[in-house]
Image: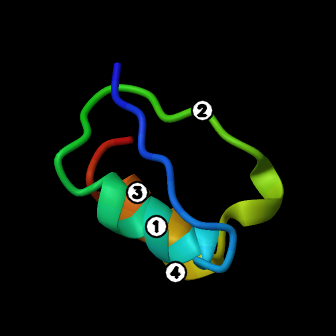
Amino acid sequence: MSVKITKGNKNDIYIASVFSKDLSGKLFGDKSYISKELFHQLLSNGI
């Protein structure tokens, strides 16, 4: 399990992209924060 807390003025899509680079397995979050680009990045990483 991993957690990252950021300031309120950070773009959640950017944080998700950075945060998921070393992630394996499953990622749970609010669907409204995913972009097409992030979706394809996660898919190509097997998440």
Residue at label 4? 37
Foreground label between 1 and 4: 1
Q: Quadrant of the N terminus?
A: top left
User: Which three-letter amino acid code belongs to the residue tagged 3?
Assistant: Leu
45 above or below 36? above
For the residues marked 1 and 2, what is the alpha-carbon distance in whole angstroms? Answer: 14 Å
For the residues marked 3 and 1, what is the alpha-carbon distance in whole angstroms? Answer: 13 Å
Residue at 49%, 35% (x, y): give it: 27
User: Which three-letter amino acid code belongs to the residue tagged 4?
Assistant: Glu
Foreground label between 1 and 2: 1
For the residues marked 1 and 4, what is the alpha-carbon distance in whole angstroms? Answer: 13 Å
User: Which three-letter amino acid code belongs to the residue tagged 1?
Assistant: Ile
Residue at label 1? 15
Residue at 41%, 34% (x, y): give it: 3
For the residues marked 3 and 2, what is the alpha-carbon distance in whole angstroms? Answer: 12 Å
- Say whether residue 21 is left or right of residue 20: left
- Say whether residue 31 is left or right of residue 12: right
Residue 20 versus residue 7: which sits nearer the camera?
A: 7
- Say whether residue 1 is left or right of residue 33: left
Residue at label 3? 42
Disc 3 secondary structure class: helix
**Can the viewer see residue 40?**
no
Residue at label 2? 28
Residue at 34%, 29% (x, y): give it: 2
